[in-house]
Amino acid sequence: MSRNKLIAAAALIALTGIALPALAQDAKDPVIAKIDGVEVTQSDLTLALDNLDPQLAQLPEEQKKLAALSTVIDAKIIAEKARSEKMEDSAEFKSRLEFIVDRELHNAYFKKYVIDKITDADVKARYDAEIAKLPPVEEVRARHILVKTEEEAKTVIKELSEGKDFAELAKAKSTDPNKSDGGDLGYFKKGMMVPEFETAAFGMKAGEVSKEPVKTQFGFHVIKVEDKRTAPAPAFDQVKDQVKQIVLRDKYMELLKTTKAAAKIEIEDPALKKAYDEANPPAK
């Protein structure tokens, strides 16, 4: 698909999910274009930009503006044709408009009372609470030398016992792609290596070299455990966005819980009522 067709398609998709109100012009809301005398303002363009299809996110800024402007213009010229047929007076349109208004008010309320009220301190407090609940996880940092035969592995073990440097032997003899790093595998947790290798590595002490070759599907390994530690927690900055989503979710669920508790909800369809009640048990 050409880039112009992509922009046109995305603009069409965007039209199905957003409202495009015409706002009065003021000094801070300049007119961008006019369609049969109807003004398209910067705020119209900004709203369209905010609702562009995600596939346009990687486009250069000017092309995104073009797609947004196309969205606004297309919406306004087609909407005017709809008005000429008085489609806004139909029951179907009014019902759809009411749904859209409810959805946008829901979003506005959520933004005002949940999103805008969450602070970095809230997110950090939740991060600290989640980290405190994490069980300690052991990690091993190991090097290995991978060879094809058991005899080769035994020769490596003998050379190491005679004082040869592990990293230098790995560079010289290992068939693993990480040989240039001296066989260094970094830190790993249980479940990250093949079982035979993992069992051997976690059963050794820091500084220890395997006394016998360890056979796996890849060949024969000689292992040196460099270090053992409790895995550090992910840094706050690494997971801040994910933690914020958890805080948003929980605060939204709390908002729903208290709002539903104060509302009288009656569902006439028995099957739907049963399904709804099962999905929304009474608050305890």
Image (cartoon, grey):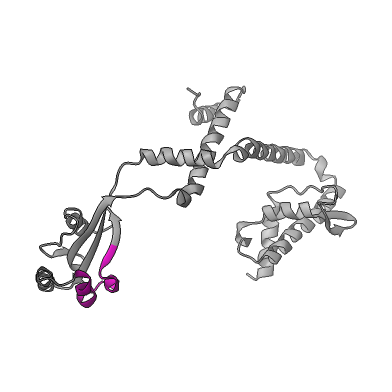
193 sits left or right of 49 in the view: left
Please state the horizontal and vertical placement of residue 281, each as a whole percent of the image: 49, 26
44 sits left or right of 194 in the view: right
User: Which residue occupies 78% across, 58% down?
Assistant: 74
Please state the horizontal and vertical placement of residue 128, each as a whole percent of the image: 43, 40
User: Which residue occupies 39% across, 42% down?
Assistant: 131
In front of the other: 45 or 165: 165
Please state the horizontal and vertical placement of residue 280, each as a whole percent of the image: 51, 29
Q: Using the rendered image of the protein, determine whether residue 122 is visible from the camera's viewpoint.
A: yes
Q: Is residue 195 magenta?
A: no
Q: Is residue 170 magenta?
A: yes
Q: Main secondary structure of the magenta part?
A: helix
Q: Is residue 180 above or below residue 265?
A: below
Look at the image and give the residue range highlighted in magenta.
166-185
Is the N terminus in the top left, top right, bottom left or bottom right quadrant? bottom right
Please state the horizontal and vertical placement of residue 275, each as a whole percent of the image: 51, 30
In front of the other: 250 or 19: 250
Q: Is residue 246 above or below residue 77?
A: above
179 sits left or right of 12 in the view: left
User: Which residue occupies 81% across, 51% down?
Assistant: 28
In front of the other: 228 or 116: 228
Outermost residue on the bottom side: it is 172
Q: Using the rendered image of the protein, determine whether residue 218 is visible from the camera's viewpoint.
A: no
Give the number of marks: 0
Outermost residue on the front side: it is 163
| Residue 42, quarter of picture | bottom right
